[in-house]
Structure formats: structure tokens, C-alpha cells
Image (spheres, rainbow, N blue to C red):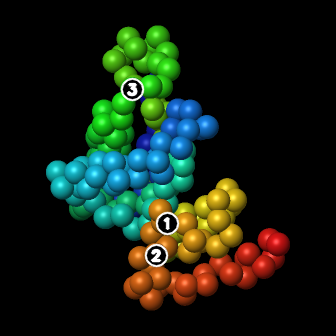
Amino acid sequence: MHYRRAWIPGGTHFFTVTLADRSQTLLTDHIQLLRQSVRDVRLRHPFSILAMVVMPEHLHAIWQLPQGDSAYSTRWMLIKSSFSRALIPTEPISLSRHLKRERGVWQRRYWEHCIRDSDDLKRHVDYIHFNPVKHAHVERPIDWPYSSIHRYIRQGVLPADWAGEAQDRRS
């Protein structure tokens, strides 16, 4: 089966990448390992991370690829395989994965969306930063430690109480 992907050299893309077993908490339990996997791939295959949040069982990211480069799938394959190889194998592996010599850590596919304009980018950055609240992990986005919101606040792009009004309406 062939999936339609937007292969835009130098493009900006939003991703959702998920563990195979959504009841696991591997991504936050092994956050340093995930960070190292991303760092290692970025050294060999540069890209900018515009925004990112790591949840226990999934992550969202917005990447800007270098001009002339559209190989985000290679980057995800390398990140996922590096992270998986560093974990002690404890997950059940289906016959299909076993025959392909795959681990059962990640869902095979991921969601990709090509960012179209500055409004689309802002909506997706906001979605990323609000995601820990949406999933009831924290009351305020700033309280989630695995989010690029902290960089946005340090750089003065967002106030520390960003989404506070949304919290008040949610209560």
C-alpha cells in the first residue's frame, strides 16, 4: 500500500508519532534516550524543531527541513530505530513484525501534515503546547516538562501564563 505524503523540499511539517502500545509510558520514562536519538539524527540529517511535545505514549513535532531536502521519513525511521534499539526488548512482537525483524515499540506509520501558512503554523504550535492539558496530564501547559513551550516562554514569544484563559473556561 502506498501512502500519499507531501514531499516538499525545505517544507515545514507537523507530525504525530505514537507507540504501538498506547498504555505504555516509554517516551517520558526514557526521555533522555529519546532526546539523544533526536540529537544524533539531527547531527547527520539536520532539521529545525519549531515546536515539540513528548507525551507518555505519543509525541507531536513541527519540523522545518533544509532547502532541497524532503526526507523526513528517513529521519523518523532513524529516530524510531535508535530509540527502540536502546531499550531492553520486553514488548510482545507480532509474527509480521518478527518476520520483518522489527521491534514492537512504535506504530509503523505516523501522521504528517504539511504546514501551509503562518496561521496553520500557529494553530499547530498551539495544539502542541496545549496537548498535555488536553490529555489531563497537567492543569497548565507550562507545567509539562517535555514541551517546547519553555523555549517559547524563555524567548518571550509566549507569556508564562499562556492558555490561562482557556484553563479558566475549562474548569
Viewer-side residue, 28 vs 76: 28
Say which label, 1 or 2, has the lower sequence index. Answer: 1
Q: Position of residue 161 (x, y in %)?
A: 61, 84
The amino acid pointed to by label 1 is: Pro
Viewer-side residue, 109 vs 79: 79
Q: Are marks 2 and 3 in contact (CB under 8 Å)?
A: no
In percent of the image, x 68 and y 70: which residue is there? 139
Q: Rounded to the nearest whole Å, what is the CA distance between mark 1 and mark 3?
A: 27 Å
In percent of the image, x 59 and y 38: which residue is there? 22
Q: Residue furthest left?
A: 44
Q: Are marks 1 and 2 in contact (CB under 8 Å)?
A: yes
Disc 3 target residue: 89
The amino acid pointed to by label 2 is: His
Crowding near the residue tagged with mark 2, few <14, some 14–19, many ≥20 C-alpha atoms within 10 Å: many
- Mark 1, secondary structure of its residue: loop
- Mark 2, secondary structure of its residue: helix
Please state, as top left, top right, bottom left or bottom right, where the C terminus lies in the image: bottom right
- Mark 3, secondary structure of its residue: loop
Disc 2 target residue: 150
| Camera-nearest label, 2 or 3 | 3
Disc 1 target residue: 145
Say which label, 1 or 3, has the lower sequence index. Answer: 3
Residue 119's image quarter?
bottom right
